[in-house]
Structures are given as C-alpha cells and as structure tokens.
C-alpha cells in the first residue's frame, strides 16, 4: 500500500550564535522535523533572504546585532503576512515577550528546550495553533504572582464553555486536543477562541494567554 508523505515545513533559522544555529539545524534535519532552507546571523541578513525564499516558518532569536528579532519580525510580517514565526528566547528576554506577541509571533521556545518540545512547537504552529514553552509559562506565572496584582476582570463576561476553552488554551492544548477533551468540534473550539479574543481585545492566542494569566482569569 502506498503511503502519502506529508511535505516537511520549510524553515529559516535566525540566530547570531553560529554553534547554536548549526546545532539546531543538525537536530531539525536529523530528526526530520522540517527542512532548513537558509540561515542568517542577524535580522538584516534574514530580511535579505526573504527576497529569495518564502519559508513556512522562521525560528527567530530575539537579541541579535545589526537588526534584532523584534525589528526583523515586524519587517518580515510586512513582507510576508502569513509567515509563521517562533521566537527563540532565554529567561532574561521577558521584557520582549509582549512586544514580540504584539508583532505577531506564533510561539516561544527556550533555547534550552529539548527535541520533543521543539517538535511540538513546530507541529502546533504549523497546524494553526500557538505554542509557549511550558517552562517559560511557569516563569511568567510566578512573576505575576510575585507582583501581587489584583484581578480586575469580571469573569462573568465569559461563558462556562469559553472558560473551559481558555483553560485548555493556557495549558497548551491544541485545537484538536481541546475539541476531543470537551467533546466539541474543532470548528466550535475556533469559534470560542474568536469570541475570547474579541471579548479581551487580544490580537492573537499568545496575547490571550498572557491576558488570562495577568488578570488571574484561569487557575494554572
């Protein structure tokens, strides 16, 4: 019986540390997670590559010389609005998370992440979901807890089902996983997600997750 091979997503790696960049490329190629079509040591050279390539996905470092990840992300999405970008981050990059989310990145993974989490991030983002490193989410939750901020959002603005969907989104569940767990269709999950984005005035799923954590809407 013939099997249908699903094409691997094409990826550009953007990072100024050559050893990390080459190691990441080797892992992605060896594990068959994607097809690396180009690499760039900074945002400026990455933007130049976009005149030649049209990748499905970009793994983008944040702190780089000449042009950092924020500037590169903004310019890249102006050139290719459908481009999916996952930020490569360190714990100390927290001040940039919100800016990168506002610009439109689809996910965040720590540079110290393992192969399985990298694979999950790539698969989730390519499927139309977002991805936050579990370790990174825990850090954000801890930081908000330390600030002792008071919740100012009235949860009654959300339906019971919307709260259930939001909880699962913040736990990192994909659309299909939420649909299966709540016994609803993926289309219904997407509808609830759209309602949540509208009610919270959030631009995308990553910003919705941070909104929920900051305002203590969900309990993780």
Image (tube, grey):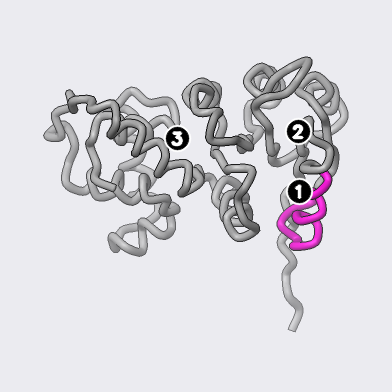
The answer to whether the residues at label 1 and label 2 have Cβ atoms under 8 Å apart is yes
Q: Earlier in the sequence, mark 2 or mark 3?
A: 2
**Which percent across, then down, holds residue 133?**
51, 46
- From the viewer's perspective, is 106 left or right of 3? left
The location of residue 40, given as percent across then percent down, is 83, 31
User: What is the quadrant of residue 146 in the picture?
Assistant: top left
**First reached walking from the N terminus: tag 1 or tag 3:** 1
Please identify the quadrant where the N terminus is shown.
bottom right
Q: Residues within 10 Å of mark 3 (few under 14, many from 20)?
A: many
Along the polypeptide, which appears first: circle 1 or circle 2?
2
Marks 2 and 3: which is nearer the front? 2
Residue at image x 78%, y 30%? Answer: 16
In the rendered image, is residue 102 in sight?
no
Mark 2 = which residue?
A: 15
Give the residue number, with chain letter if any, for mark 3. 206
Within 10 Å of the Cα at label 2, are there few (<14), some (14-19), or many (20+) other Cα atoms?
many
Disc 1 secondary structure class: helix
24 part of magenta stretch: yes
Q: Residues within 10 Å of mark 1 (few under 14, many from 20)?
A: some
Residue at x 60% of width, y 60% of height: 116
Q: Is residue 35 left or right of residue 62?
A: right
| Labelled pair 2, 3 in contact (Cβ < 8 Å) | no
**Nearest to the observer: residue 36 or residue 220:** 220
Front position in the image: 209 or 114: 114
Residue 127, position as x, y percentages in the image: 56, 50
Vertical relation: 97 (above or below) 116:
above
* Residue hosting label 1: 24
Q: Residue at x 47, y 47 (%)?
A: 135
Q: Which residues are magenta?
A: 22-35
């Amino acid at each position: 019986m013939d099997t249908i091979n699903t094409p691997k997503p094409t990826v550009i790696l953007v990072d100024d540390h050559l050893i990390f960049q080459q190691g990441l490329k080797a892992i992605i190629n060896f594990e068959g997670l994607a097809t690396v079509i180009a690499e760039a040591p900074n945002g400026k050279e990455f933007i130049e590559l976009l005149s030649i390539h049209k990748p499905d996905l970009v793994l983008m470092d944040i702190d780089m010389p000449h042009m950092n990840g924020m500037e590169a992300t903004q310019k890249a999405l102006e050139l290719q609005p459908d481009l999916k970008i996952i930020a490569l981050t360190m714990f100390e990059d927290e001040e940039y998370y919100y800016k990168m989310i506002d610009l439109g990145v689809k996910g965040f993974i720590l540079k110290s992440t393992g192969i399985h989490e990298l694979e999950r991030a790539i698969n989730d983002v390519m499927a139309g979901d977002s991805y936050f490193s579990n370790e990174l989410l825990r850090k954000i939750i801890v930081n908000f807890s330390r600030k002792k901020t008071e919740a100012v959002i009235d949860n009654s603005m959300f339906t019971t089902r919307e709260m259930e969907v939001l909880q699962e989104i913040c736990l990192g569940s994909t659309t299909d996983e939420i649909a299966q767990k709540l016994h609803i269709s993926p289309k219904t999950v997407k509808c609830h997600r759209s309602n949540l984005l509208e009610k919270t005035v959030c631009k995308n799923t990553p910003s919705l997750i941070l909104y929920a954590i900051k305002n203590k809407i969900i309990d993780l």
